[in-house]
Amino acid sequence: QVQLVESGGGLVQAGGSQRLSCTASGRTFGNYVMGWFRQAPGKEREFVAAISRSGVNTYYADSVKGRFTISRDNAKSTVYLQMNSLKPEDTAVYYCAADQKSAFTGSTYGYASAYEYWGQGTQVTVSS
């Protein structure tokens, strides 16, 4: 079992930046593929980004590619999501997720069903 706690959400103006953090506890963090998802009101949860166990490989949704960067610090058991050039449509609850079952590929870890553990979410609101 691994517990995930997100932080760093809040209100930001369009064009601004924000960094989310997700800290894990309970198991060896480096064994887990980590992902970020988001869910806007009335919409389904959607994939944002994922990162391999070592941090070498990453995968992004087209909607955030070039604006968001996922990274991890295994020594701190933390995964980050740096969000730049934020848009009002980025407003959502952002969730981090973890899984250790499979090898890292975008085709696997681009889907919420691939992840076993989830955080409680953090709200990001982008004002226009």
Image: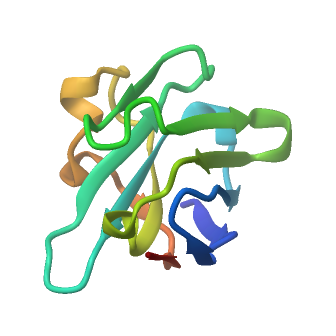
Quarter of the image containing the N terminus?
Answer: bottom right
Expressed as whole percent of the image width and height from the top left, the position of residue 8 reads: 69, 69
In terms of depth relative to the viewer, which is nearer, 47 or 10?
A: 10
Expressed as whole percent of the image width and height from the top left, the position of residue 34 reads: 50, 42
Quarter of the image containing the C terminus?
Answer: bottom left
In terms of depth relative to the viewer, which is nearer, 61 or 14?
A: 14
Expressed as whole percent of the image width and height from the top left, the position of residue 124 reads: 51, 75
- Asked whether, in this view, residue 109 is left or right of residue 122, the answer is left
Q: Residue at x 65, y 46 (%)?
A: 79
- Asked whether, in this view, residue 89 is left or right of residue 120, the answer is left
Above or below for 98 versus 16: above
- Asked whether, in this view, residue 42 is left or right of residue 122, the answer is left
Q: Residue at x 31, y 66 (%)?
A: 89
Q: Residue at x 64, y 70 (%)?
A: 5
In terms of depth relative to the viewer, which is nearer, 31 or 58?
A: 58
In terms of depth relative to the viewer, which is nearer, 107 or 114?
A: 107
Q: Residue furthest top?
A: 56
Q: Residue at x 45, y 68 (%)?
A: 94
- Asked whether, in this view, residue 102 is left or right of residue 45, the answer is right
Tally the numbered discs: 0
Report the colour scheme: rainbow
Q: Residue furthest right?
A: 75
Q: Residue furthest bottom?
A: 41
Expressed as whole percent of the image width and height from the top left, the position of residue 90 reads: 38, 63
Q: Residue furthest front?
A: 128
Quarter of the image where one finds residue 45: bottom left
